[in-house]
Image: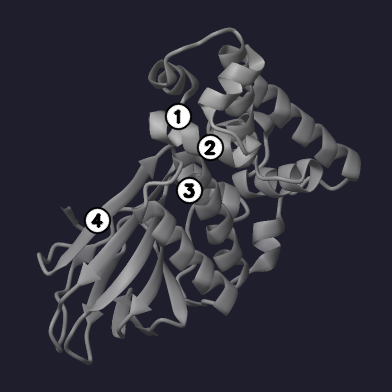
């Protein structure tokens, strides 16, 4: 647990902290009343309100937030949170590094000041992402989903900014997808932001381009490469599933077994007998 603001009534459980992105479950139990002046934001973040209602004052401008809205924070912003009711609120915060912010927001590292509507599909995806994060699902998949969710939310504010930098032609997009294939073939553990930076495109554009070309997400492709490598090792007589999981980047042996069964319909033990 960590303190998200300076008040101890606000805590955040960090569910993902990887590469250029983080996911936190933020809980506030502030009673009805005015908040404390001078609390400064420490991160770039996109925050979804899940429950409750509060006022956020930044640079002298007051905004009302409830579960139909999302808002952004920029480092150094002085902010105050006022609560019209008791019982506090619960939010989901996606923290972002400046380079990722700029790639998502047309090159600008400063996120919008005004709240954004949280469309039903966007709100549901954020709740599904939170549930997947609580279950400890694959970090690469969570990262890709968080980036796409952030882009979808920012599109509510200015779709032209979010679309800036997208490769214009079909051939250019195909070249980007092929280059991503090459990068992951060399190192399946490379993150989406890392590959995108090397290819000179934003992470959310790479995710969309890759899915359109391959028919599945980049995180799914990464997992399929790991499964193929596991099958090759099983065919060669590998006996230790724990060693196989550790070598190939699975969370543990149980994760290896779940993914292989999901991809092939068979257990690793059955596949080892069939392939040997």
Residue 189 visible in the shown view: no
- Measured as percent of width and height from the top left, residue 88 is found at 21, 80
Q: Are marks 4 and 3 in contact (CB under 8 Å)?
A: no
Q: Residue furthest top?
A: 236
Q: Quadrant of residue 233?
A: top right
Q: Nearer the viewer, residue 247 or 67?
A: 247
Q: Nearer the viewer, mark 1 or mark 4?
A: 1
Q: CA distance from mark 2 to mark 1?
A: 9 Å
For mark 1, what is the residue? 250
Circle 1 — which element?
loop
User: What distance separates the C-alpha of mark 4 from that of mark 2?
Assistant: 27 Å
Q: Are marks 2 and 1 in contact (CB under 8 Å)?
A: yes
| Residue displayed at 50% across by 40% down | 140
State the separation of the CA atoms marked 1 and 3: 14 Å
Seen as rendered, the residue at the extreme bottom is 84
Crowding at label 4, few (<14), some or many (≥20) Cα neighbours within 10 Å?
Answer: some
- Tag shown at residue 259: 2
The answer to whether the residue labelled 4 contacts the one labelled 2, judged by CB atoms less than 8 Å apart, is: no
Residue holding disc 3: 142
Front label number (4 vs 2): 2
- Give how far across and how far down residue 152 sits, in percent: 60, 64
26 up-or-down from 169: above or below: below
Mark 1, residues whose alpha carbon is within 10 Å: few (<14), some, or many (≥20)? some
The answer to which of 207 and 62 lies nearer the viewer is 207
- Badge nearest the viewer, 1 or 3: 1
Residue drawn at the location 67% of the way across and 40% of the way down: 201
Q: Earlier in the sequence, mark 4 or mark 3?
A: 4
Q: Which mark is on residue 13? A: 4
Rendered image: mark on residue 222:
none
| Residue displayed at 56% across by 26% down | 270
The mark that comes first in sequence, 2 or 1, is 1
Dot placed on the residue nearer the N-terminal end, 1 or 4 = 4
């Amino acid at each position: 647990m960590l303190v998200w603001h300076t008040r101890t009534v606000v805590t955040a459980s960090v569910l993902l902290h990887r590469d250029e992105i983080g996911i936190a479950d933020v809980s506030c139990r502030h009673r009805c009343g005015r908040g404390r002046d001078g609390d400064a934001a420490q991160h770039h973040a996109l925050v979804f309100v899940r429950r409750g209602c509060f006022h956020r004052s930044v640079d002298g401008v007051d905004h009302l937030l409830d579960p139909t809205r999302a808002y952004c924070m920029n480092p150094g912003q002085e902010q105050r949170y006022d609560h019209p009711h008791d019982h506090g609120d619960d939010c989901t915060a996606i923290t972002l590094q400046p380079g990722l912010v700029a790639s998502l927001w047309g090159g600008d590292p400063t996120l919008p000041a005004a709240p954004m509507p949280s469309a039903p599909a966007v709100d549901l995806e954020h709740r599904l992402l939170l549930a997947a994060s609580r279950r400890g699902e694959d970090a690469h998949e969570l990262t890709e989903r968080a980036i796409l969710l952030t882009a979808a939310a920012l599109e509510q504010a200015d779709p032209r900014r979010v679309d800036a930098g997208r490769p214009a032609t079909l051939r250019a997009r195909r070249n980007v997808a092929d280059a991503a294939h090459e990068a992951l073939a060399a190192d399946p553990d490379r993150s989406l932001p890392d590959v995108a930076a090397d290819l000179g495109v934003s992470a959310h554009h790479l995710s969309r381009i890759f899915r359109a070309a391959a028919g599945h997400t980049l995180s799914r492709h990464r997992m399929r490469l790991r499964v193929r490598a596991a099958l090759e090792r099983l065919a060669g007589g590998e006996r230790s599933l724990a060693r196989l999981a550790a070598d190939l980047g699975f969370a543990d042996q149980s994760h290896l077994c779940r993914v292989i069964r999901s991809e092939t319909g068979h257990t690793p033990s059955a596949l080892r007998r069939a392939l040997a």
